[in-house]
Amino acid sequence: MIRLLNVSMMPPGVGQPVLRNLTLTVPKGEFRWLLGPSGAGKSSLLRLLTLETRPSAGQMDLLGVSVSQASRSTLRNLRRRIGFVPQDYRLIGEWTVFDNVALPLRLRGASERDTRREAFAVLEWLDVVHLADKRPGTLSGGEQQRAAIARALIGRPELLLADEPTNALEDAQARRLLSTFQELVDMGTTVIVATHNEALVREAPAKSIDLRDGSLADPAPQDEPALHRSGTL
Ligand SMILES: Nc1ncnc2c1ncn2[C@@H]1O[C@H](COP(=O)(O)OP(=O)(O)OP(=O)(O)O)[C@@H](O)[C@H]1O
């Protein structure tokens, strides 16, 4: 469950908030599109939800943790429960795809045996297992994007956040990614996907968080109960 109550966010050195007074709830195991024109605040909201930045006002509860009151170690544990696919992938160029994907588990001190098993499982899931030994710089944009998605999924996150995860994918791959999101939702994962891809949104209609100029375009629907907890997005 994600709950924001009157949350604003003002980056340091910026005179005005880039997110204003957001109040919204996303129940566990639900999917939301994160929509809005360029500059509306989608990436800023994802940065809040990945705990890269903190609210400057308001209250944010993520996966049962009240973020403003949480200790450093609580936040560190919370971060491990969140998977993020950044817009720019952030793959480490000197490492193989396998090592990039394995990183979250290695940071947690998982055994090499478990790490290999999980890494190959997510690489297969994302259809990039044949690229395990390649370096990101030798891959196409779509391949790098799928590797970044595999890295976000390796820890079996309870919350998956993705920033434009289909912008380098061909239509068939984007559709396939939609079914991966559906599988995650069916497993109880909360999934939030920022996108400009209107065709994709039409293909998988679901509730959305609509931002305009740092605020919710239409605050009311966020408070309505979920219509679909399973089945199609
Ligand atoms: N750290 C920062 N310092 C200054 N301004 C910022 C900062 N972060 C975001 N902004 C501003 O906040 C606004 C929202 O930016 P954000 O990147 O969240 O929008 P977006 O909806 O993700 O846009 P796009 O679809 O183009 O990626 C923009 O006007 C941006 O310039």
Image (cartoon, rainbow, N blue to C red):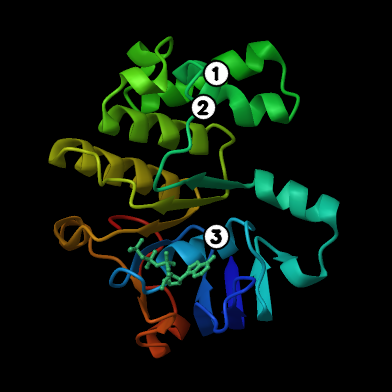
Mark 3 sits on what residue? 47
Percent across and percent down for residue 83 are 54, 45
Give the CA separation, mark 2 to mark 3: 20 Å
| Residue 228 rendering spot, x and y as whole percentages | 36, 66
Q: CA distance from mark 1 to mark 3?
A: 24 Å
Among numbered discs 1 and 3, the one appearing first in the sequence = 3
Separation of marks 2 and 1 at Cα, in angstroms: 9 Å
The residue sitting at 63% across, 63% down in the picture is 53
Mark 3: few, some, or many residues within 10 Å (few <14, many ≥20)?
Answer: some
Question: Which amino acid type is marked by label 1?
Answer: Asp
User: How many numbered marks are there?
Assistant: 3
Rendered location of residue 208, percent (x, y):
34, 71
Q: Which residue is mark 1?
A: 99
Q: Residue at x 42, y 16 (%)?
A: 135
Q: Which SS class for mark 3?
A: helix
Disc nearest the viewer among 2 and 3: 2
Image-based side of 209 in relation to 52, left or right: left
Specify few, some or many for label 1: CA neighbours under 10 Å numbering under 14, 14-19, or 20 or more.
Answer: many
Amino acid beneath label 3: Arg
Q: Of 3 and 21, which appears nearest the observer? A: 21
Above or below residue 151? Residue 196 is below
| Residue linked to disc 2 | 92
Q: Nearer the viewer, residue 119 or 189?
A: 119
206 left or right, relative to 67: left
Vertical order, 59 against 82 (above or below): below
Secondary structure beneath dot 2 equals: loop
Labelled pair 2, 1 in contact (Cβ < 8 Å): yes
Mark 3 CB near ligand 1 (8 Å cut): yes
On residue 26, which mark appears? none
Residue pictured at 76% horizontal, 48% vertical? 76
Q: Is mark 2 within 8 Å of ligand 1?
A: no
